[in-house]
Image: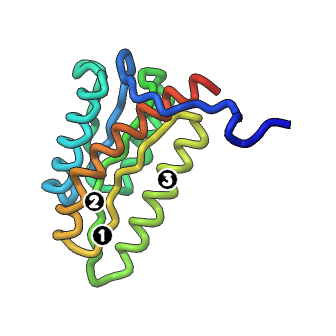
Amino acid sequence: MGTPNKLPECHPDLNGAGLKIGIAMSRFNIDVCEGLLGACVTELLKLGVAKEDIFLASVPGALEISLVLQKMAKSGKFDALVALGAIIRGETYHFELVANESGSGVTRVMLDSSMPIANAILTVEDDEQALVRMSEKGADAARVVVEMVNLLKKI
């Protein structure tokens, strides 16, 4: 019987060459969303994804992202997708509704389509938290989609 250290393992593969990536981005809280987008695209390019293989669809708000992701997933044009948005807490219950439903929608599209989707829809208390997180979360989304495409190819 082998030891756990001898298990076959798929190591992270961050080679994005040849991958086609679709991005659905909310225009609500646009400054934060554009920060997420800039960081995501910069990282995708560093990972070898060609600029012409990145497609951006902007939508009014976070709740509309899932529908666009679903359409992109069904199109057969993409290897993976990214959801970008910023939901900033206000004084009403609307924050919880949008945060929960957008997250659920992204996950449902990913599972229904078997396509990797990086969820970089920030859910934060205020603008300051969003600005602090946008660069890292955007870049992380790029790494997640590239790694997941390559992992699923190996399984």
Q: Is residue 122 left or right of residue 151?
A: left
Q: Is residue 22 above or below residue 64?
A: above
Tell me the residue that label 3 is attached to.
Answer: 105
Q: Is residue 101 above or below residue 54?
A: below
Give the label on residue 86, or none.
2
Between disc 1 and disc 3, the foreground one is: 1
Q: Secondary structure at mark 3?
A: helix
Tell me the residue that label 1 is attached to.
Answer: 124
| Residue type beneath disc 3 | Gly
Q: Quadrant of the C terminus?
A: top right
* Local crowd size for mark 3, using a 10 Å CA cut-off: few (<14), some (14–19), many (≥20): some
Between disc 2 and disc 1, the foreground one is: 1
Q: Which of the marked residues, 2 or 1, is nearer the chain's N terminus?
A: 2
The residue sitting at 30% across, 27% down in the picture is 47
User: Separation of disc 1 and disc 3 at Cα?
Assistant: 18 Å
Q: Which of the marked residues, 2 or 3, is nearer the chain's N terminus?
A: 2
- The image position of residue 12, as x and y in percent, is 48, 33
The residue sitting at 27% across, 69% down in the picture is 88
| Residue type beneath disc 1 | Val
